[in-house]
Image: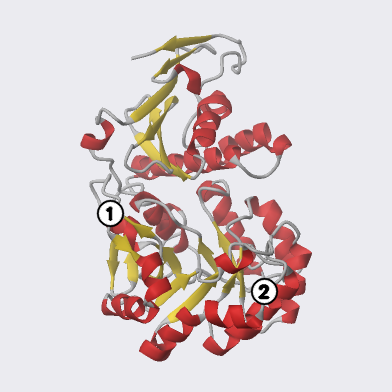
Amino acid sequence: MKITALETVQLAKFPRHLWVLVHTDEGITGIGEAYDKVELTKSAILNFCSEVILGKDPLDNEILWQQMYDSANYTGYSGAEMRAIGAIDIALWDIKGKVANMPVYKLLGGKTQEALKVYNTCISFGDIRDREWFLNDAGGLAQSLLDEGISAMKIWPIDQLSERYNGQNVHRDAIKKGLEPFKKIRDAVGSKMEIALEMHSRWNIPMAVRIAEELEQYDPMWFEDPILVDDASNIATLRSRINLPILASERYYTRFQFRPLLEMCGCDIIMFDIGYSGGITECKKIAGMADAYRLPVTTHNCGSPLMTNVCAQLLISCPNSTVMETVRSHYRLFDMFEEGVDIREGHIYVSDKPGFGMTMKKEYLDAPDTIRVKKEAVGDSQLFAVTGDPWAVSPGDDKAGRIVIKVD
């Protein structure tokens, strides 16, 4: 089996998301996903990644990952190149499952739980306005989630407090006011709802300590990314000064960045983003490293139903997985797949279909405002044909310096 083409898909209705199709000469196609800054990721997929993997066996995901990483890592661990590797790696695992006629979780070792507990990250999309709801009526939102069987949620009500002084100073009275959604939730539903605070790395250490002291009374599920994660020793310092569990971090990429965080005992819960951090091949290793330190893992996930299922298939194979991030406004309203997400009574159940069991609807693939760019090898040479946007591929990036552009 050989990889014959890479194709990117952008849907007008969902501009922050990008899907990649990996085509093979046996008619099996795998699908992966990336999100945020998608034009950069698209360029990375169609340029350096394509030149590494076109013509290769898609089942050789370990060496393909290493070759793509070796090609990219001189510019650093992160950014568009890693998002491109992550999206492609997801698609390769989809192919692997389809070839084996098994769901991906079986190839990763099977289930360690029957289903995974989920929490709702309160993002607004379409007519589901969970962000406005937690800012204005957090108690009502909590009751709404409990009515669906979801007993954990994540909110970020104090981000705006960091803006005036760039996260360098905040008065305790302002913190108390900002944390009112926590009080409203506790007043409305008591301890029935677990609540995580997302902080988006906006604070310095002293202010993060001050916020933690005010938050402690509400018994939060965790304290997420309170400071920048560019130095693991700073996170470890903060952890030694507060009494809340720290979660870190969707902003870390690959096992090489997570290693010092683990060695310094910098946090209590490890979170990685499968798309950002190199896909399933890499994130399964990060989960294993965390398990050696007896730490739980979870995934950052603001993706489509595909990414939600990808996260579930990986986490259910990890013995140290904990509650999983989902976004109900996404898995309900992102309707580009034939299949949905199976969430019942606050738990996600994984599909037993081959691969990830997800098929993009033809009506989306063929829509006039859908942007599809396909790069394929021509014969056995380093000659490529590009269908779609000719500016998505940089002439001269291939080894032979020859690219044929075909525009539909």
Q: Amino acid at mark 2?
A: Val
Task: Give above or below for 285 relative to 56.
Answer: below
Q: Who is closer to the viewer here, 332 or 312? A: 332
Determine which residue is flagged by label 2: 170
Q: Name the residue type under label 1.
A: Leu
Could you say whether the residue bearing mark 2 is in a helix, strand or loop?
Answer: loop
In the image, what residue occupies the spot 60% across and 18% down?
397
Q: Residue 239, percent across and down?
A: 71, 76
At 33% across and 33% down in the image, what residue appears? 28
- Under circle 1, the secondary element is helix
The scheme the figure's colours follow is secondary structure
Residue 350 visible at all: no
Label 2 and label 1: CA atoms lie apart by 37 Å
**Which disc, if any, is residue 333?**
1
Q: Nearer the viewer, mark 2 or mark 1?
A: 2
Q: Earlier in the sequence, mark 2 or mark 1?
A: 2
Q: Residues within 10 Å of mark 2 (few under 14, many from 20)?
A: many
Quarter the N terminus occupies: top left
* 77 on left or right of 362: right
Q: Crowding near pointer 1: few (<14 within 10 Å), some, many (20+)? A: some
Residue 140 drawn at (x, y percent): 32, 79
